[in-house]
Amino acid sequence: STFSGNEAGDFGNRDDLFPEILRDEAVARLYELGQVSDASGYLERTFLSPASMRAIKLISRWMEDAGLRTWVDQMGNVHGRVEGANANAEALLIGSHLDTVIDAGIFDGSLGIISAISAVKVMHKKGKLEKLSRPVEVIAFSDEEGVRFQTTFLGSAAVAGTLPVKALKISDKRGATVEDVLKENSIEMTEETFSKLKYDPRSVWGYIEVHMEQGPVLEQAGYPLGVVKGIAGQTRLKVTVRGSQGHAGTVPMSLRQDPMAAAAELIVLLESLCKNPEQYLSYDGHCSDLSVKSLSTSLVCTVGEISTWPSASNVIAGQVTYTIDVRAIDDTGREAVIYELSNRMHQICDRRSVSCDIERKHDAGGVISDPHLSSQLKSAAYSALKKMEGDIQDEVPTLMSGAGHDAMAMSHLTKVGMLFVRGSISHSPQEHVLDDDVWAAGLAILTFLETL
Ligand SMILES: NC(=O)N[C@H](N)C(=O)O
Ligand SMILES: [Mn+2]
Ligand SMILES: [Mn+2]
């Protein structure tokens, strides 16, 4: 059957479905958090911005309301923890991110935090928190999108212990470093406190994350939930093209070194290479035919940001800067694409007598979810949907994630699993997840916790 996602059908005994907490309150909180923005008129909440600080307070309150002990660490991650019946057992971590892109939707990141808190709140109401077989900790990470500093996972990589201390020196467009931003929020960060953020792998059992799919698969399947089998790897580059700035009216075309026209050619090259990688990538040892084949289905490349100097209509630009985002399931293939791309970019720049600077801003290898965690998430999702919809035939879909998630960073600390919730449009104010699918997500986490 396909799940309409409207009012669910005739329920089993409704009193173990908790719609008031897992749907109504959770949806209300998504809208409330969605209003916490650094901009008026659209949603923007970047690393440790004023809106992020307000979001931290709101999320802390919700965690306390769910019976969790809360604290905020020096990288702005909000933690809510309950020790359960065996305080010395390895903990289950459940997380997602509280930061957003620019002109964001209200579900990306927030859904995973709010549905986890709601599931814990139901356990709290049922007096079951203290009976949990292991400690459970919800973490709202401070920077997954990496919009402000272009390196992502500042919060989760700090917890996973993979964030290099030199990250504190990374600066944003205004020249403010991560350290400056911490100081602005009166967070004194020393190398010692920085290293204290890292969790001991022996104290962690696993990490799960609930996140909207941000793609079409679950909508096509007519299914509210899906299990993530893996997350594509990603690389972010910053390209600076420098030419000779000049007068738009007097410099003959043949004498121009125009970085704007060069950037245009470079961007079209990126698009054609990523649309047809097999036409560009030779089998010269950089790329096996297996990688090239997997590239043709999973490779995606994007130029999302571009700026130019001096940006005046009657001036030939002096400099153009733009970002490149490359993703693929196969890390070898992604590396081969970047290798080939850089070579061809330099050829174009040389031919145009402009200079090309390609800076590698961020790399995250692809991640395969832990099969055991995934099967537990799958059965939790299945039984949650069975409770909501009565009988269901087909099984819970499994799918890949082209989007990055904090689970990529956490995979360096512990085994990870992810549950996707139906919702295709994202990184846009049109982003939407149905109320009943929010409910299904909360019920799935509740079931997962009860069978922990
Ligand atoms: N680190 C990231 O990949 N951030 C977003 N989730 C993204 O997919 O772009
Ligand atoms: Mn996102
Ligand atoms: Mn996200």
Image: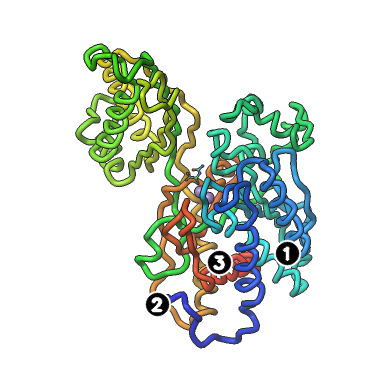
Against 380, residue 19 (above or below) is below
Classify mark 2: helix, strand or loop: loop
Against 81, residue 267 (above or below) is above
Q: Callout 3: few (<14), some (14-19), or many (20+) C-alpha neighbours within 10 Å?
A: many
Q: Which residue: 79% across, 35% down?
A: 186
Amino acid residing under circle 1: Leu
Amino acid residing under circle 2: Gln
**Front residue of this view, candidates 169 and 52:** 52
Q: Callout 1: few (<14), some (14-19), or many (20+) C-alpha neighbours within 10 Å?
A: some
Q: Callout 2: few (<14), some (14-19), or many (20+) C-alpha neighbours within 10 Å?
A: few
Q: Which mark is residue 424?
A: none
Query: Which residue is at the far front?
Result: 249
For the N terminus, which image quadrant? bottom left
Distance from Cα at disc 1 to Cα at disc 3: 20 Å
Distance from Cα at disc 3 to Cα at disc 2: 19 Å
- The residue tagged 3 is 441
Q: Which residue: 78% across, 65% down?
A: 130
Comes first in the chain, label 2 or label 1: 1
- The residue tagged 2 is 393
Horizontal side of residue 263 vs 126, given as left or right? left
Query: Which residue is at the far left?
Result: 279
**Front residue of this view, candidates 340 and 40:** 40
- Report if residue 355 is visible in the image: yes
- The residue tagged 1 is 132
Distance from Cα at disc 2 to Cα at disc 1: 31 Å
Query: Based on the displayed image, in which of its 4 quarters is residue 292 positioned?
Result: top left
Comes first in the chain, label 1 or label 3: 1
Query: Based on the displayed image, in which of its 4 quarters is residue 392 positioned?
Result: bottom left
Classify mark 1: helix, strand or loop: loop
**x and y percentages locating residue 78 in the rendered image:** 71, 49
